[in-house]
Image (cartoon, helix red, strand yellow):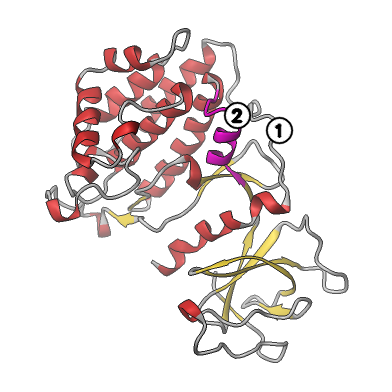
Amino acid sequence: MEDRVDKKKGIMPPKKHRKNNLPDPLQEGIILTDTQKHKWRLGPMIAYGGFGLIYLASPCLDVPVENNTVHVIKVGSMFSLFMVMERLGEDLQTIFERQGRKFNNETVLHIGMQVLDVLEYIHENEYVHGDIKAANLLLDYKNPHKVYLADYGLAYRYCPSGNHKEYQENPKRGHNGTMEFTSIDAHKGVAPSRRGDLETLGYCMLQWICGSLPWERNLKHPEVVQAAKTKLLDELPDSVTRWAPAGENCGKIARFLKNVSNLTYDEKPQYKILRKILFNGLEQKGICYKETLDLTSVQSTLNECTIHHRKLFHFVYH
């Protein structure tokens, strides 16, 4: 929701020379009124960039905004508008690196199922995400066992008014997205699709379990990466089994990728089957899907949460 700033409450006009046409910072403690007539007290600014300025905010008007508040406000280049959003916690890439670039098998399956639920919802509403990766997966600020998918800068409406985009390769648009995880379609310059999102999720899960992907040393050579991904998909499940570290069972990830690789470009994925594949991996270990994520030492602190808010606002302006 976009909300207008109360211009009588301390707005300063933007300076013409300010980079990216960002507004001047607002005064801490001013009261903003949104379109629903709800009032918000502005706290300190915690992040900024080309996307705008991010502030802590609270509906408690008579006391200073505390550092553990659960809301943030974003003010963009149009300084008379602002957006109130829930505050989120750490991204999974930060946690992945902190834990030695390794998640246990159960954690990966848990995360995979949560992301799959999100993707099914997005896909049912005619959009694909286009850039799934750990850096775009954020934990709930208060409940670090819940995962959110952020950064919709590459989101694409693949099926406007129920009409799926046609498969068409465009070398000039090839290799779009994050090189480690982008789909074969994206390498070929094909418009994003549902199968591409799921393929990308499969690569993410494989990296989280194994610590790396077979093509990570060649990221400066997109054609080499594309060939390596094609080889991995063509040789499933053996290719994943060979890549998995000793003692790691990546069979469910191989099955997931195999199912996805068999999809045609405009085919609706069988989300129930994909979910069942991941669920069976948990069930075999006697683990309930609703149990907590095993992400130890995760803390929702101010310093850990600041810069990640910028990812949440791409969708509004794209």
Q: Is residue 116 above or below residue 255?
A: below
Quarter occupied by residue 278: top left
Residues 227 and 161: in front is: 227
- State the mark number for residue 297: 1
Q: Residues within 10 Å of mark 1 (few under 14, many from 20)?
A: few
Amino acid at circle 1: Ser
For badge 2, the amino acid type reads Gln
Residue appearing at x 65%, y 52% in the figure: 305
Hey, which quadrant is residue 273 in on the image? top left
**Picture quadrant of residue 138:** top right
Measuring 84% from the left and 69% from the top, which residue is drawn there? 64
Work out whether residue 266 can be spotted.
no
Image mark count:
2
* Secondary structure at numbered mark 1: loop
Query: Relative to 269, does residue 237 appear above or below in the rendering?
Result: above
Q: Position of residue 306 (x, y in %)?
A: 64, 57
Q: In the rendered image, is residue 175 in sight?
A: yes
The C terminus lies in quadrant:
bottom left
Instruction: Say whether residue 211 is left or right of residue 260.
Output: right
**Tag 1 near tag 2, CB within 8 Å:** yes
Q: Earlier in the sequence, mark 1 or mark 2?
A: 2
Q: Nearer the viewer, residue 175 or 58?
A: 175
Identify which residue is drawn at 87% across, 74% down. 62
3D distance between C-alphas at marks 1 and 2: 9 Å
Q: Which residue is mark 2?
A: 99
**Stretch of the chain drawn in magenta:** 90-103
Q: Secondary structure at mark 2?
A: loop
